[in-house]
Image: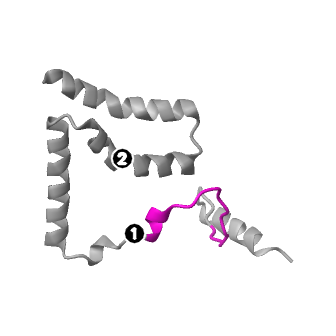
Amino acid sequence: MESKRMLQYRYLLLQRKNYYETSFTFEAKVPYEFKSLERGQDLRKWNQEKLEQKVIDFYKKQWRLINDKEIKEYFSFLELKEKETCQSAFDSRKELEENLSAYLEPYSACLKQF
């Protein structure tokens, strides 16, 4: 008797599809834990006007930090995001340095204008 997957594959061939699709459940074991994911919220459930105002206020603050050349505070907003992104991608030291350079380049150019 053919397996379920083989029957699915034969069906796809008959349908002339150029991809194979299946789904399964698994438990991923990773060497890190992100607390930020536990604090996540569904922003679709927020009042959209209040959410928009929060976003606008955040970017106004970012702009002020750039204009005031408050580099440490500006980059403090990126630190957790970058740390978690690099951990989940298992980035090397070289890749971390490239990411930092990518952030610093436009900021450095902005500072030279002042």
Q: Nearer the viewer, residue 86 or 5?
A: 86
Asked if the residue at tag 1 contacts the one at tag 2, i.e. Cβ–Cβ closer than 8 Å, the answer is no
Q: Please give the label number shown on residue 78.
A: 2
Q: Look at the picture and state if 34 lies above or below 7.
A: above
Q: Secondary structure at mark 2?
A: helix
Q: What span is colored magenta in the figure?
A: 22-38
Q: Secondary structure at mark 1?
A: loop
Question: Hey, which residue is sitting farthest top in the picture?
Answer: 112
The answer for how far apart the CA atoms under marks 2 and 1 are is 17 Å
Q: Quadrant of residue 102?
A: top left
Left or right: 20 with respect to 114?
A: right
Q: Which residue is mark 1?
A: 40
Q: Earlier in the sequence, mark 2 or mark 1?
A: 1
Q: Quadrant of residue 24?
A: bottom right
Q: Which quadrant would the N terminus be assigned to in this image?
A: bottom right
Give percent across and percent down for residue 104.
33, 30
Left or right: 50 with respect to 98?
A: left
Residue appearing at x 24%, y 76% in the figure? 46
Give percent across and percent down for residue 16.
60, 60
Q: Quadrant of residue 66?
A: top left
Q: Residues within 10 Å of mark 1 (few under 14, many from 20)?
A: few
Give percent across and percent down for residue 29.
67, 62
Q: Which quadrant would the C terminus be assigned to in this image?
A: top left
Question: Hey, which residue is sitting farthest right in the picture?
Answer: 1
